[in-house]
Amino acid sequence: MSGSLAPLIYVLAFVAVVLIIQSGAGIFFAARERTTKVNRRLSMLNSGMAPEDVYSALVRRAPASSITNERFLHFYDVLWTRCRQAGLTITPWRLLAMVGASTAVLWLMAMVMVRSGSAGGFFGTAIFALIGAATLSITGAWLWVNRLRAQRLKKLEEQLPLALDVVVRAIRAGHPVVSAVQLAADELGDPIGSEFGLIVDEYTYGSEFREALLNFARRTGSSDAHFFAVSVGIQSETGGNLAEILDGLSNVIRSRRALGMKVKALASEGKASAVILSLLPVFMVSVMLMTDPSYYTDKFGDPLFWTIISFVGVLYVIGWFIIQRIINFKY
């Protein structure tokens, strides 16, 4: 069985390697292109795209009319929001397709390295290799998106006090608040420049300014952005000196960031240990499933094996929650 499928596996492995090289080159050149852009929204506008198309590409959610199940629709919404907060313009379907392609590539590599003589053994090897490849691909995609999201959120919160300073100076110079936000959008780079520009775009297309700010806060996932939206919303209802409010908010954000950097510096060693302890078991089990599935399958007939596996799984989940509570600080 395995001998008859060996030529097909080699051909598919060759195709997979070609796809990996092509995808890696595309990601590399796309990353270089992103680094040359100061403001993604302005770059898209300067390239000749209509403002409506730019807004649609950066904000509007791709339709999910084919999904009728509420749980899958909620998962789609969460995945879409996560991608946008990471600065990715790809759709959730494309991200899932990338995960599927990565799973297929890893599975083919595992099947090339692992061989089994009997048909039953080959089928079992293929199944467990597929499980290991899928686990590695999903974990890798999750880490990749979360890392991009954390980097973008960090940069946005670094730029937000500067943007508020620009808005405050523009308001004190006599500009209306929308014009002040537009000025900050034109002067600052990504991600805050594009996000402020999208606030102005939403207001231009008919949304209330307060609602546009709330959408900005939801879109970025930043607590500081929520403070900004709430401050402007309260000022629009109760009145007051908006320049003084935003100036105070800018100082508060800077103070919170300084405290947050101190906390992260003190907790960096613990967080690194937590990441290693959380991901190492998943990585090791997935690699073993891909390279030597019989290491686990030979024990399936032993009732004690499933008892120990269940007990270890429960301990792993409990330990993961405890570690998350230890390393996540509220400040």
Image: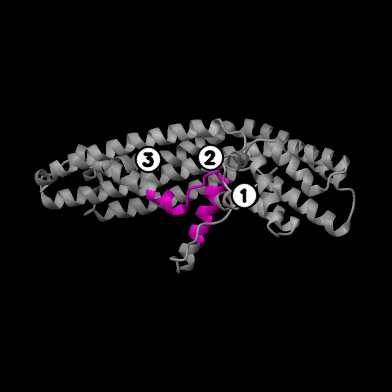
Disc ID at residue 283: 3
- The answer to which image quadrant residue 7 occupies is top left
Above or below, comparing residue 72 to residue 166 in the picture: below
Measured in 3D between alpha carbons, the distance from the residue under mark 3 to the one under mark 2, in whole angstroms, is 21 Å
Q: Is residue 250 above or below residue 32?
A: below
Identity of the residue furthest to the front in this view:
48
Q: Secondary structure at mark 3?
A: helix
Kindly identify which residue carries mark 2. 148
Residue 76 image point, x, y percent = 48, 58
**CA gap, disc 2 and disc 1:** 26 Å
Q: Nearer the viewer, mark 3 or mark 2?
A: 2
Residue type highlighted by circle 1 = Pro
Q: Which residue is mark 1?
A: 51
**Residue 52: in magenta span:** no
Answer with left or right where residue 289 lies relative to residue 217. left
Which is in the foreground here, disc 3 or disc 1? 1
Dominant SS of magenta comes to helix
Residue drawn where x is 74% and y is 52% of the image: 229
- The answer to which of 130 and 205 lies nearer the viewer is 205
Instruction: Give the magenta range.
Output: 74-97
Does the residue at mark 3 contact the one at mark 1 (Cβ under 8 Å)?
no
Which three-letter amino acid code belongs to the residue tagged 3? Phe
Residue projecting furthest to the right? 240
Q: Is residue 69 left or right of residue 111?
A: right
Report the amino acid beneath label 2: Leu
The crowding category of the residue bearing disc 3, from other C-alpha atoms within 10 Å (few below 14, some 14 to 19, many at least 20), is: some
In terms of image quadrants, where is residue 102? Answer: top left
